[in-house]
Image: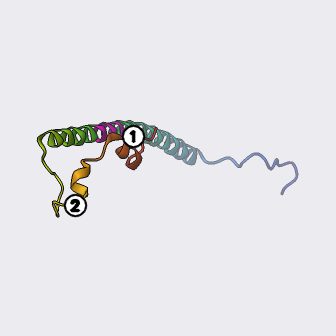
Amino acid sequence: MAPGQNSSVPPTLPPSVEAAYKLKCIALKKRMAELDEYNDATRQRVIRNTRAIRKMRLERAFLLKSIGEITERKGLSIGFGDPDSDASSEGPPTVNSYSSLYPIRK
């Protein structure tokens, strides 16, 4: 190192290189803003889809419970396979059994 030079100051660059770096910095900032906007939109879409899935699971459990109650009242069996099996008399799963299969995540 030559005497009198400060090691913390970077060497000066030609004006064309400085301008190129400035343009590149502007382009990178613009790209970061685009990515942030895209990430926010994706995050909102994921939240909306998660809510929709939770709602559909509850609706499914409710409908299965309703079907089970209707079939019990009419004395119908909705089981598959052997009509004498115990599985046909159990009825559909309840809302509580679905909540253990599909836990609600916040």
**Which label was assigned to residue 85?**
2
At a point 31% along the width and 42% down the height, the residue shown is: 94
Per the image, label 2 sits on a secondary structure element best described as: loop
Q: Where the N terminus falls, by quadrant?
A: bottom right
Mark 2 residue crowding within 10 angstroms, few (<14) / some (14–19) / many (20+): few
Judge left or right: residue 22 versus residue 12.
Answer: left
Q: Please state the extent of the stretch shown in magenta in the rendering.
A: 49-58
Pick the residue in front: 14 or 72. Answer: 72
In the image: residue 29, left or right of residue 86: right
What secondary structure do most residues of the magenta stretch adopt?
A: helix
Q: Nearer the viewer, residue 8 or 73?
A: 73
Q: Secondary structure at mark 1?
A: helix
Q: Residue at x 84, y 55 (%)?
A: 2
| Residue receiving disc 1 | 38
Foreground residue among 29 and 2:
29
- Residue 80: x percent and y percent? 17, 59
> Height in image: 59 above or below 89?
above
